[in-house]
Amino acid sequence: MSSPSKPASSEDIIGQKYDRCLADLLVKTGVGFSAGVVASVILFRRRTWPIALATGFGAGAAYADCDRSFNPARIPGTRIIPHSETSPSQ
């Protein structure tokens, strides 16, 4: 017999969201950095601005995903329906 699992606390949920955001930031910034290095070496004769630009794009994409994780109202097409005060409460 398995014991009933207790619900996750809000602190655990917030911690998991922060962990996911940090991991996403590291991955997307790393991918942006490496894409910037490749573009810098191949296309722009070893200039540094493609590296900074691509790294910034990666960090910005991670920030936007994290913002959507913490504030679901910012997801396009999402509608927040307020709890009506005229509805019968039980």
Image: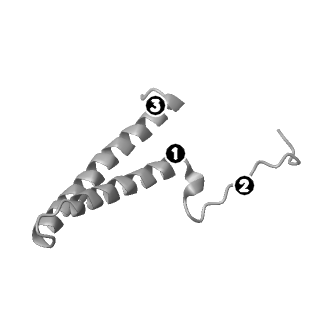
Establish if 15 lies above or below 47.
Answer: above
The residue at which mark 1 appears reads as 70
Which one is nearer the viewer's eye here, 10 or 72?
A: 72
Q: Which residue is rendered at x = 49% and y = 29% of the image?
A: 11
**Image location (x, y in percent) of residue 16:** 41, 37
**Image location (x, y in percent) of residue 14:** 48, 35
Label 1 element class: helix
The residue at which mark 2 appears reads as 81
Q: Is residue 5 visible?
A: no
Label 3 element class: helix
Q: In which quarter of the view is residue 28 placed?
A: bottom left
Label disc, if present, on residue 14 of the rendered structure: none
**Image location (x, y in percent) of residue 75:** 54, 59
Establish if 66 lies above or below 52.
Answer: above
Instruction: Give the side of residue 5 with respect to residue 30, left or right.
Output: right
Q: Residues within 10 Å of mark 2 (few under 14, many from 20)?
A: few
Instruction: Give the side of residue 20 with respect to residue 76, left or right.
Output: left
- Mark closer to the chain start, 2 or 3: 3
**Image location (x, y in percent) of residue 74:** 57, 56
Kind of residue indicated by mark 3? Asp
Label disc, if present, on residue 12 of the rendered structure: 3
Label 2 element class: loop
